[in-house]
Structures are given as structure tokens and as C-alpha cells.
């Protein structure tokens, strides 16, 4: 199951229409709506600064939140739309959808790497290069994993681990159909430079006979 789901604190918006929305913005709030889940839509206001901080943190549209509104039960929501001012590019309205436990959603799940201490490539001085620290998966709202475990214990230098070799949590599947790389073990820079020098500097007995004669 998922770890702690971040809270999103809101207040119920009294009144509807453009007048109430304008008043909210004057009060440094962003109006929004929470809909779905088989119950009536709930008009809300969100603190502007908190919303902006979450938006700037990235992946706001693919993050699951625990919506807390005074006088209402907490509910899991995901943002479905952020309207912005065309000039200032600041949020002016936000739409959230309530999620049932069986709802399928796209979320970025962190990757946890194990087996570095036994990887033959890393033992030889190779470097684990993480291509995707997170993987976007289609998951069920009631069964969101904390992370995806990727075992690199069998990787040699220049080996890579792809999504097809990873055991995903039950019920989860990647949003990308192709077999993409998650991480690889690259050769250490010193080893690479040494190999290049050996290739570029032939031994004396490899110099063509005509060149030896001219010398």
C-alpha cells in the first residue's frame, strides 16, 4: 500500500457563480470544485500560496491527495484541470475528481534499487546510472504502492535493466507500451579512458614495415 498521501486543505465556498469566484481571488484564494464519486459537486476555495507551491513542485495532475474540508469527510482526489490566467499564468480555478477505491489512475511511483552491493559491474567500479527514478503506472486508487523495487544484483558493466524485467505490484502496469530502460551500469571514466588509449596507441611491432624503413 501507499505511504502517506499528502493532505490538501480547503474550505467550502459559499455561493456560486462569477461573483463568489472573484471574491475568493480577492481574498487570496483559488476557487475550485470537487466532483464525482456518486455525490453532489462541492465548491471549494484553496489558499493561493499553498496551491502555487504544490503546482511548482511538479506532477500536480498525477498526484493523489487527501482532500480535507471542514464539515465533510476526507476524500481522495486527483486534479483533473487547472485554469490559469492567460497573462500571468497563475491558477484561477481548479477541478478535482473524487476517487473510489476501484478507480484506475495514472501516478508516478518512486523506484527503489536493491542489490548494488552484489552487482558484479558495480564491484568492478561501474556506476549505477538511474534513468527513471520514478515510473508512471496505471494503478488502482485503493492499492497504490509505495515504490517499485528494481534488483540490479545481476548487472555487469554496460548492462541495463528495463521495465520488462521488473516485477510490478499486483494490478499495476506501465503507461508506456515499449520496453524502456530504468537504469544501467556504466563503466568508470578511468577504465574508459584507459581502453581508448590502448586502442589509439598501437605497439611498435604493429607499425607497418614501410614506416619503420623510412625512419
Image (cartoon, rainbow, N blue to C red):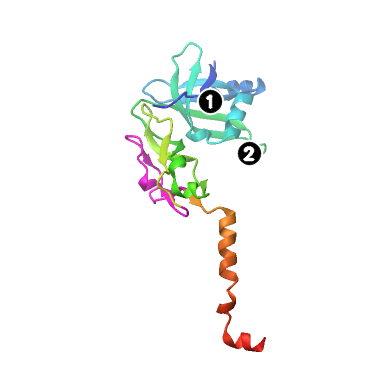
Residue on which the image places disc 1: 32
Give the answer, above or below, for where 165 lies relative to 21.
below
- Res. 86 mark: 2
Disc 2 secondary structure class: loop
Q: Quadrant of the N terminus?
A: top left
Q: Residue 114 location in percent, x, y? A: 44, 38
Count how many numbered circles sit on residues in the image: 2
- Res. 213 mark: none
- The answer to whether residue 144 is left or right of residue 209 is left
Residue at (57% x, 67% y) in the render: 198
Disc 1 secondary structure class: strand
Which sits in the foreground, 23 or 31? 31
Which sits in the foreground, 67 or 154? 154
Residue numbers of the magenta segment: 157-183
Give the answer, above or below, for where 214 lies relative to 116.
below
Image quadrant assignment for residue 212? bottom right
Q: Quadrant of the C terminus?
A: bottom right
Which sits in the foreground, 7 or 113? 113
Residue at (58% x, 29% y) in the render: 54
- The answer to whether residue 20 is left or right of residue 145 is right
Q: Are marks 1 and 2 in contact (CB under 8 Å)?
A: no
Q: Residue 163 location in percent, x, y? A: 39, 46
Mark 1–mark 2 distance (CA, rounded to whole Å): 18 Å
Residue at (60% x, 71% y) in the render: 201
Neighbor class of circle 1 (other Cα within 10 Å; few <14, some 14-19, many 20+) is many
| Nearer-N-terminus badge (1/2) | 1
Q: Residue 67 location in percent, x, y? A: 48, 21
Image quadrant assignment for residue 172? top left
Farthest residue in the front direction?
A: 205
Residue at (33% x, 28% y) in the render: 102
Amino acid at each position: 500500500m501507499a505511504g502517506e498521501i499528502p493532505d490538501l486543505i480547503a474550505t467550502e465556498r459559499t455561493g456560486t457563480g462569477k461573483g463568489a469566484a472573484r471574491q475568493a481571488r480577492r481574498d487570496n484564494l483559488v476557487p475550485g470544485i470537487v466532483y464525482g464519486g456518486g455525490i453532489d459537486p462541492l465548491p471549494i476555495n484553496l489558499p493561493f500560496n499553498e496551491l502555487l507551491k504544490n503546482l511548482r513542485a511538479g506532477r500536480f495532475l498525477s498526484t493523489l491527495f487527501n482532500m480535507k474540508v471542514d464539515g465533510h469527510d476526507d476524500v481522495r482526489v486527483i486534479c483533473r484541470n487547472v485554469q490559469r490566467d492567460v497573462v500571468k499564468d497563475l491558477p484561477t480555478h481548479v477541478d478535482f475528481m473524487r476517487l473510489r477505491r476501484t478507480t484506475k489512475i495514472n501516478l508516478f511511483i518512486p523506484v527503489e534499487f536493491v542489490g548494488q552491493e552484489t552487482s558484479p559491474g558495480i564491484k568492478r567500479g561501474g556506476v549505477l546510472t538511474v534513468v527513471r527514478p520514478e515510473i508512471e503506472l496505471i494503478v488502482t486508487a485503493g492499492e497504490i504502492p509505495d515504490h517499485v523495487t528494481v534488483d540490479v544484483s545481476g548487472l555487469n558493466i554496460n548492462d541495463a535493466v528495463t521495465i520488462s524485467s521488473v516485477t510490478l505490484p499486483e494490478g499495476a502496469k506501465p503507461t508506456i507500451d515499449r520496453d524502456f530502460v530504468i537504469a544501467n551500469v556504466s563503466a568508470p571514466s578511468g577504465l574508459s579512458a584507459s581502453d581508448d588509449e590502448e586502442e589509439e596507441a598501437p605497439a611498435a611491432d604493429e607499425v607497418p614495415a614501410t614506416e619503420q624503413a623510412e625512419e
